[in-house]
Image (spheres, helix red, strand yellow):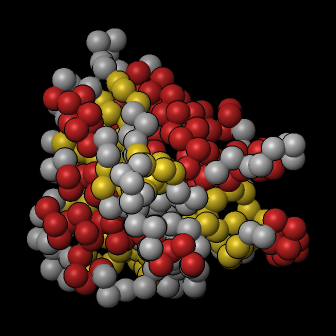
Amino acid sequence: MRLAIALGGNALLRRGEPMTAANQRRNIAAATAQIALVAAGNELIIAHGNGPQVGLLALQAAAYPCVEPYPLDVLGAETEGMIGYLIEQELANRLPQDATLATLLTQVEVDPEDPAFVHPSKPIGPLYSLAQAEALAASNGWSMAPDGEHYRRVVPSPRPQRILQRRPVEWLLEMGAIVICAGGGGIPVRYEQTGRVSGVEAVIDKDLCAALLARELNCDRLIIATDVDAAYVNWGSDNPLAIAAAHPSELERLVFAEGSMGPKVQAACEFAQATGGIAAIGCLNEIEQLVAGTAGTQVSVTIQGIDYRRC
């Protein structure tokens, strides 16, 4: 099969965990150990999130006030290289020595008139208390939003329109390479009236970009690996219900958190409806089972209604 696997940024740097290189490498090692189990006989495209990482780079840039902070598109490119390097190295260490891996910086076109630019929703960076969030919003002009019991900075997250490096990804796959691309949802860019390409101050949702990539490359499955084991209804209540399997049209009727589970469900539904393939949402440590269809939330047009799994 041709598999698109999207690794969540919050799974690679877990919520509340110190944002160190060692912690990130350890989490990536766990993810690549799972990916290695599904590598034999399959074509692999690996995307990843970058919310915590791009936020960390923004904080580091702000600590040097002698120059203007680097824009989010440049920070996104930095995270593609940083995370891609770690994934490529850790995965190569778990595969036969003749395995070929390639990390590709990926530009993704967005619409500069996307309403997301006036309604920031993509969480980046670390968790803050309410008092810290209010102070940062006042001092830096940031938009802040709740993330569980804490707060995080939120930035515009326009929908991906077109992946500029689609053909190089196809060429690499045809040569037998495992391709790591569209990291952090890709580097957001726009076409100006002159035809010139320029960066955009935003962070694209990696799940929506991974779904677009999976559709354009005719993938059989889209695997969205995150820090929870499934999509839930009644999340945060005394009676949460895990969704074991669902038809995309039924799943779209439910409401999920914007900026976190919402885009994952949307991406899974769009892929399943457009291709007839299977999308799965679940835990990073269960990638093999997600591919096999025995874990997480399985989304397919062949499923009738919604099946729940009580916690």
Q: Compared with residue 39, is residue 94 higher up or lower down, i.e. above or below?
A: above
Q: Compared with residue 13, is residue 95 higher up or lower down, i.e. above or below?
A: above
Query: Most extreme residue toward the bottom, as rendered?
Result: 253
Q: Is residue 179 left or right of residue 198?
A: left
Examine the image and state in which quarter residue 303 appears: bottom left
The residue lying at 57 percent from left, 78 percent from top is: 118
Q: Could you say which is closer to the camera, residue 161 or residue 31?
A: 161
The location of residue 40, given as percent across then percent down, is 22, 29
Examine the image and state in which quarter residue 144 appears: bottom right
The residue lying at 78 percent from left, 70 percent from top is: 141
Q: Compared with residue 274, is residue 90 higher up or lower down, i.e. above or below?
A: above
The location of residue 132, given as percent across then percent down, is 86, 68
Q: How many marks?
A: 0
**Quadrant including the N terminus:** top left
The location of residue 109, given as percent across then percent down, is 38, 56
Q: Is there any visible trace of residue 286 in the rendered image?
A: no
Query: Most extreme residue toward the front, as rendered?
Result: 194
Examine the image and state in which quarter residue 176 appears: top left
The residue lying at 47 percent from left, 78 percent from top is: 115
The residue lying at 25 percent from left, 84 percent from top is: 250
Q: Is there any visible trace of residue 238 in the rendered image?
A: yes
Q: Is residue 227 left or right of residue 281?
A: right
Q: Could you say which is closer to the camera, residue 189 or residue 309?
A: 189
